[in-house]
C-alpha cells in the first residue's frame, strides 16, 4: 500500500499530483481531481450540469455527472493510455463540482449555466462539462462564443438537434439551430458525426451520417473533420447517443446503427490538430445503463478530451512551465 492516496479529491496537496486511490474506494471526483471552487492557477476545469428537464424522451441525464465521475475511477494513473503521459503532471486540473439549478424554475437555467461558465472561462482555464441533457450546450456555447467568437461545432450525435424552436423554450433537440441563429457557431465550419435521423433543417452544417461512419475508417473520418474545421476555434460536443446502443444503452434517445466506442475513440485520438476551445459529454442517463457500459464510455471520452488538451499545452509550453498550484 506504499504511496497509495485516499480521498485524493479532498486531500490532494497539489493540483498536479497523481491520485492513486484504490479503484473501489475514496471520494469520487472526475479522475480524482481536487474538488475546489477556487480557479487560481488552474489549467483545466471539469464541471457537472445535472440537468435533464429539456429531455424529449427518457429523462435521467441529471445523474450523468455522478455516473461519469464514478466510472472515471477505473483509469490507471501515469501514464494514461493512449496518451502515454500523466495528463495532470503539467495540466493543473480541478473538479469544480456541479452547477446549482432550481428544478422548479427552469426559466432561469440557461442564464445560470452561462453565468457560471463565464466565471470559469474568465480564469483562462479550459472547460470540460459533463451533462446533463444536450440543452446545456446552448448556454455553454454562449459563454465560449463571448470569448472566442463564433465556433466551429464538432458534434458527435445521433441527432442533428436543429428542430424548429421558439425563443425561450428549453429543448434538448434544438440547441444547434438556436446556436446558428444566435451566431454562436460558424455553420460552414461545423460538422456532425453519426447522425441517424432527419431534422427539417441542416443549417448548412456538414453531416457524416451513421452509414458514412460505418463505411469509413477512423483515419478517414478524422481527416474529414480536420479539413472541414481547419484552424477555426472549435467546440467539441459529444452526445453519448452517437454511439450504438450496444455501446451506450444508458441514454435518453438511443438509435441503432451507430459506431462502436472503439472506433470513435480512434477518431478522437486523431483530432490533436484541432484548436479545441471547450468540450462537453452529454446525455449519459445511468438509470438505463448496464454494468456502467455507458458511464465508462462517457468517462473515457471525457478523459480523451482532457488528454488532447494536455498534449496541446505540452506542445505550447516546455514541460514544467505550465501553471502549477
Ligand atoms: Mn444531441
Image: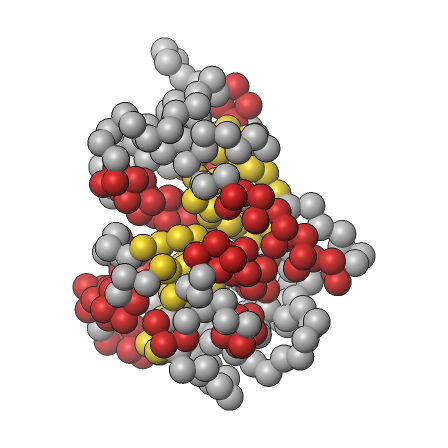
Asked whether 111 or 217 is in front, the reply is 111
Vertical placement of residue 302 versus 23, above or below:
below
User: Where residue 303 sits: x, y (%)?
Assistant: 38, 44
Query: Which image quadrant for residue 76?
Result: top left
**Nearest the camera: 297 or 204?**
204
Q: x, y (%) of residue 301?
A: 39, 51
Give the camera-side residue of 99 and 211: 99
**Dividing the image into 4 quarters, which one contains the N terminus?**
top left
Whether residue 166 can be seen here: yes
Could one spot residue 23 in this view of the protein? no
User: How many numbered discs sit on the rendered protein?
Assistant: 0
Report the residue that reaches farthest toward the bottom. Answer: 200
219 left or right of 248 in image: left
Give the left or right position of residue 30, taking residue 316 as reference. Answer: right
Decide: is 125 above or below 193. above
Q: Give the quadrant of the C terminus.
A: top left
Q: Residue furthest top?
A: 2
Pick the front one: 19 or 98: 98
Determine whether 85 is above or below 197 in the image: above
Which residue appears at 39% of the width and 78% of the height? Answer: 205
The residue sitting at 63% across, 80% down in the picture is 165
**Coloring basis for residues:** secondary structure
Question: In which quarter of the view is residue 150 placed?
Answer: bottom left
Q: Residue furthest right?
A: 104
For residue 256, side relative to residue 166 (left or right): left
Q: Position of residue 161 (x, y in %)?
A: 52, 74
The structure residue drawn at horizontal position 58% and vertical position 60%, both measured from the top left corner, is 139
The x and y percentages for residue 318 are 22, 31
Q: Residue at x 37, y 71 (%)?
A: 190
Q: Is residue 168 left or right of residue 28?
A: right
Amino acid at each position: 500500500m506504499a504511496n497509495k492516496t485516499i480521498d485524493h479529491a479532498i486531500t490532494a496537496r497539489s493540483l498536479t499530483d497523481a491520485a492513486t486511490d484504490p479503484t473501489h474506494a475514496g471520494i469520487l471526483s472526475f479522475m480524482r481531481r481536487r474538488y475546489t471552487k477556487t480557479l487560481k492557477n488552474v489549467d483545466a476545469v471539469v464541471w457537472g450540469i445535472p440537468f435533464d428537464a429539456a429531455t424529449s424522451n427518457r429523462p435521467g441525464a441529471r445523474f450523468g455527472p455522478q455516473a461519469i465521475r464514478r466510472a472515471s475511477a477505473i483509469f490507471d494513473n501515469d501514464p494514461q493510455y493512449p496518451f502515454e503521459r500523466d495528463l495532470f503532471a503539467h495540466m493543473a486540473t480541478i473538479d469544480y463540482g456541479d452547477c446549482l439549478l432550481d428544478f422548479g424554475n427552469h426559466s432561469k437555467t440557461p442564464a445560470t449555466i452561462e453565468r457560471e461558465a463565464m466565471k470559469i472561462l474568465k480564469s483562462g482555464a479550459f472547460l470540460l462539462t459533463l451533462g446533463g441533457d444536450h440543452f446545456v450546450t446552448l448556454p455553454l456555447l454562449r459563454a465560449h462564443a463571448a470569448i472566442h467568437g463564433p465556433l466551429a461545432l464538432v458534434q458527435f450525435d445521433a441527432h442533428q438537434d436543429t428542430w424548429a424552436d421558439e425563443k425561450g423554450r428549453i429543448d434538448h433537440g434544438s440547441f444547434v439551430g438556436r446556436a446558428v441563429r444566435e451566431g454562436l457557431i460558424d455553420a460552414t465550419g461545423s460538422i456532425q458525426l453519426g447522425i441517424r435521423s432527419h431534422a427539417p433543417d441542416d443549417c448548412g452544417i456538414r453531416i457524416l451520417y451513421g452509414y458514412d461512419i460505418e463505411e469509413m475508417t477512423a483515419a478517414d473520418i478524422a481527416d474529414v473533420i480536420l479539413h472541414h474545421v481547419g484552424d477555426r476555434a472549435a467546440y467539441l460536443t459529444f452526445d453519448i447517443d452517437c454511439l450504438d446502443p450496444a455501446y451506450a444503452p444508458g441514454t435518453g434517445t438511443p438509435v441503432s446503427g451507430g459506431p462502436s466506442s472503439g472506433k470513435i475513440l480512434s477518431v478522437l485520438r486523431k483530432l490533436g490538430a484541432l484548436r479545441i476551445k471547450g468540450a462537453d459529454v452529454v446525455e449519459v442517463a445511468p438509470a438505463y445503463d448496464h454494468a456502467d457500459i455507458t458511464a465508462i464510455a462517457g468517462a473515457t471520452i471525457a478523459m480523451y478530451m482532457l488528454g488532447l488538451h494536455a498534449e496541446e499545452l505540452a506542445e505550447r509550453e516546455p514541460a514544467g512551465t505550465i501553471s502549477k498550484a
